[in-house]
Amino acid sequence: MRKLAMIAAVALPMFGTAAFAQETVKIGYIDPLSGGGASVGEVGYKTFQFLADELNAKGGILGKKVEIVPLDNKTNPQESLIQAQKAIDAGVRYVTQGNGSSVAGALSDFVTKFNDRNPGKEVLYFNYAAVDPVLTNDKCSFWHFRWDANSDIKMEALTNYMKGVPAIKKVYLINQDYSFGESVRTTAKKMLASKRPDIQVVGDELHPLLKITDFAPYIAKIKASGADSVITGNWGQDFALLLKAAADAGLKVNWYTYYAGGTGGPTAVKQANLNHQVFQVGEGIPNIDHKPSQEFEKALRAKYDFSLFYPRAVNEMRMFAAAAEKAKSLDPVKVAAALEGMEWDVFNGGKGVMRKSDHQFFQPMYISSLGERSEKEPFDEEKTGWGWKMVAKIDTAATELPTTCKMERP
Amino acid sequence: MLELIVISTLNGVLFGMLLFLMASGLTVIFSMLGVLNFAHASFYMLGAFFGFQISRWVGFWPALLIAPLLAGAIGAGVERYGLRRVHKNGHVAELLFTFGLAFAIEEIVQIIWGKSPVDFRVPPLLDFPAFTIFSTNYPAFKMFMLAVSIVIFVGLLVVLKKTRIGLIVQAALTHPHMVGHLGHNVGRIFMLVFGVGTALAAVAGVIAGPALVTQSNMAGLLGPILFVVVVVGGLGSLPGAFVASLLIGLVQTFAVSMNGSLAGAFGPLSPDYAATWLSDIWNVTIAQIAPIMPYLLLVLILIFRPMGLLGTRDT
């Protein structure tokens, strides 16, 4: 009898939370919250929480509160699947993930198989930062939606800008040794060869992911090659330390990057004293003359100690809410159908569209450089005093690339 | 080509010296206590964060002195109240203790300073290029790092070989029990050595913090390679650690600067094998495998010379 009472005492509150769970929309946030990727994953988690709060302040989605469930995947594909299963068991129907294309590939595959086997219990996967093009091409899935521009789109924008800079003669490529870095280097070589055949690729380096502490030997190699520009997809500490070593050696080249704005990046750029010599391609920066996004930036900075690194996450959450309202349902199948082809006024201004054929979101892209600010750039980064300045804007239409995706719909 | 060789040599020596700064403490602790201190790199990290915090308050130079003293005091405390009790349960318990300690320190650092890198700057006094060679600058701060390593190496050697306490440490290296039987306060000496060892790691931290990056996973990044240095040099041998640090620094730096691959040496692989695992091996460059070179060296040393390059004790 006592045993029974104890079981009841433990089980009843569990039923209680299960009943309560019906009242919330749970989004499983599967990203590194410990280990080498933690600094990035932590910022992402807080960003999503901030966005959930924003939706809840307006009454949630279809009257239900939005809740972000943090799940630590340690940047490991295997661990991510365990976490995804755990989330699904806890009643999560929407998962979001961004760090690491290796993780994204595994997760997309997992969700697709799960949905095949469990009709009526479908799960949607919102990808906010994993940019391997294959996810919306050969390995595309109806259940996967990507808000970040894929690596090819970013390289297309970057090389289009580089095409118009005659001073670029010799380019050095340095990237992380995994699927994403591989994709950056091959696309860069291909696109440069067709757009500016006169540019010489003087180096093509792959280094281990998140393991190098001193990049001085790599910098010596870049210097010896005589390069005037470097293209890199490095993120996190791999970018910060690379720049730091460049600063120490006094290497003065222009840097064309994907993620210079990530944690530690702006600090390293400032230390290297590369005033407006580091360029980044992305879907937005704080210093775009657009009132609503600047208001958002101010509110975020007032609450947390970082700037918005994921404008795409804002688009993701707001579009999710809009799609659910449009479908008048939180059933993932109906939400997915509503998201397909959805047109959207993006966070930093301008039109965007979630392409129906591959579930890739297309939006205006910006090339920006980090350095001293004028009155037009109110925001600095990481308290360095330096901020992002827009140098080129690419309209949505110009970012659209063909896809090889053959979408299978349920 | 000459340019790359000269610069790579310099870089290799610089990286080697940084490794030595850390490995010296580890090897001194090992020679005395017989404990492979897994938390050693964590004290290096503590040194960096203490250095960062103290230099905020009173400047870099006092930090260079205070941070190692603080970390050394913590190290001594860990030995006195932790390791000494665990010691009764044998070496495995000690290893596990230091292993757990490493995680605990990392968590504490994350709680206090967060997971992102902190902005630890090179002091203005040393923030200029010392000299320029082949149009590459060499920061004065790195030269300072080099000088400190050499001073510590010489200082430690003198203490170990010429002083009374060094004599006891030497004796403990080969006959730890006999030293105890002779009536020395082995407990206090152990505490002192552990404290000095961790303080040395902290010195490395304060110096490497501004030169590399100060964040909560810095211990995990350099920890494994320290063991390579100590094992290759010979467990407990200070000159061994010195030679091994330089060797590993040079090997790694030169490997990075080489582009050679099997494809480069023997021509491209025949297309028949293009899609097989062989093509990966064929096309990988020496630069790409540079980071695993030290571990390869570790394996080879353990097979062919288990006592290390200059080691005397076969473990």
Image: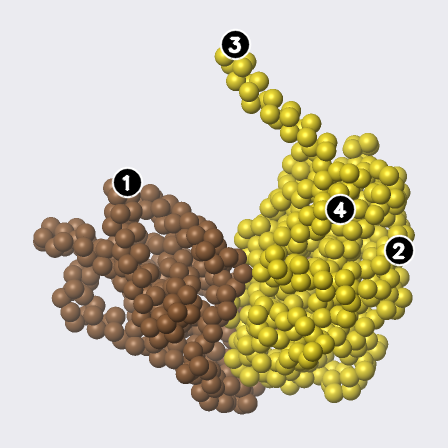
Tag 4: residue type? Answer: Lys
Residue appearing at x 77%, y 79% in the figure? A162
> Answer yes or no: do the residues labelled 3 and 4 have beta carbons within 8 Å?
no
Q: Is residue B135 left or right of residue A362?
A: left
Q: Which mark is residue A58?
A: 4
Residues marked 4 and 2, same chain? yes
What letter labels the chain drawn in brown? B
Looking at marks 3 and 2 on the same chain, the residue that comes earlier in the sequence is marked by 3
Gap in angstroms between the C-alphas marked 1 and 2:
67 Å
Callout in the foreground (3, 4):
4
Residue A129: percent from left, percent from top: 71, 57
In the rendered image, the residue lying farthest to the top is: A1
Gap in angstroms between the C-alphas marked 3 and 2:
60 Å
Residues marked 3 and 4, same chain? yes
Q: Mark 3: few, some, or many residues within 10 Å (few <14, many ≥20)?
A: few
Residue B135: percent from left, percent from top: 55, 90
Residue appearing at x 63%, y 61% in the figure? A301
| The C terminus of chain B - image quarter | bottom left
Q: Which mark is residue B89?
A: 1
Tag 1: residue type? Answer: Asn
Gap in angstroms between the C-alphas marked 3 and 4:
48 Å
Looking at marks 4 and 2 on the same chain, the residue that comes earlier in the sequence is marked by 4
Pointer 3 residue: A1
Gap in angstroms between the C-alphas marked 4 and 1:
60 Å
Q: Which mark is residue A343?
A: 2
Is disc 1 placed on a helix, strand or loop?
Answer: loop
Residue appearing at x 14%, y 53% in the figure? B185
